[in-house]
Image: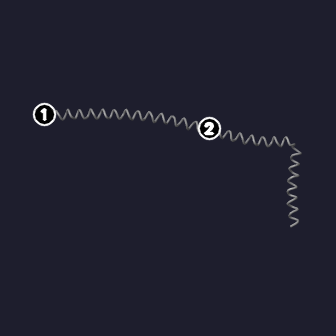
Amino acid sequence: MLLQRKVKIMDDHNILIALAAIVSALGLKQVWEIIKQKIDINAKKEERQDNIYVEQIEQLSTKIQQLETKIDELIKENIHLKVKIVKMEARLVTNANKKAATKRYKDE
């Protein structure tokens, strides 16, 4: 057991020595620059993803607006067609009444 504890302590000690060696070899400023670059790269990735989402939202909103205008046009067209149908039905009824009236007189 005593041997295992010494190995664990040695491992932690070795890690600290390695970290100190890296910091001293590169210098604290360069280590900070590396960390800063990593943070900047991650921020740029998030920014690009946000820009992509914004573009997709804008495209979808324009499509929705186009669909709304198309629906409005179709509703207006539908109303016009209904008016035409009502007028045609009225003409058919008046023509049928006229024909029925003339047939009655001929049969009598």
**In front: label 2 or label 1:** 2
- Which residue is farthest bottom? 1
Q: For mark 2, what is the residue?
A: 54
For the point 84% across and 41% down, the residue is: 30
Left-right relation of 29 to 43 = right
Q: Where residue 32 appears, x then y in whole percent? A: 82, 42
Image mark count: 2
Compared across the picture, whether 59 is left or right of 108 comes to right
> What coloring was used for the rendering?
one colour
Please name the residue shown 58% across and 38% down the image: 57
| Residue 34 screen position, x and y as percent | 80, 42
Which quadrant of the figure contains the N terminus? bottom right
Q: Amino acid at mark 2?
A: Val
- Kind of residue at badge 1: Lys
Residue 12 image point, x, y percent? 85, 56
Q: Measured from the top left, where is residue 41 in percent x and y?
A: 74, 41
Q: Which mark is residue 106?
A: 1
* Position of residue 94 in the picture relative to residue 15 (left or right): left
Residue at 50 percent across and 34 percent down: it is 66
Earlier-in-chain disc, 2 versus 1: 2
Density class for disc 1 (Cα within 10 Å; few <14, some 14-19, many ≥20) is few
Kindly identify the residue that appears in the image at 88 percent across and 49 percent down: 20
Splitting the image into 4 quarters, where does residue 5 fall?
bottom right
Q: Is residue 56 left or right of residue 91?
A: right
| Disc 2 from disc 1: Cα separation | 78 Å
Label 2 sits on a secondary structure element that is helix
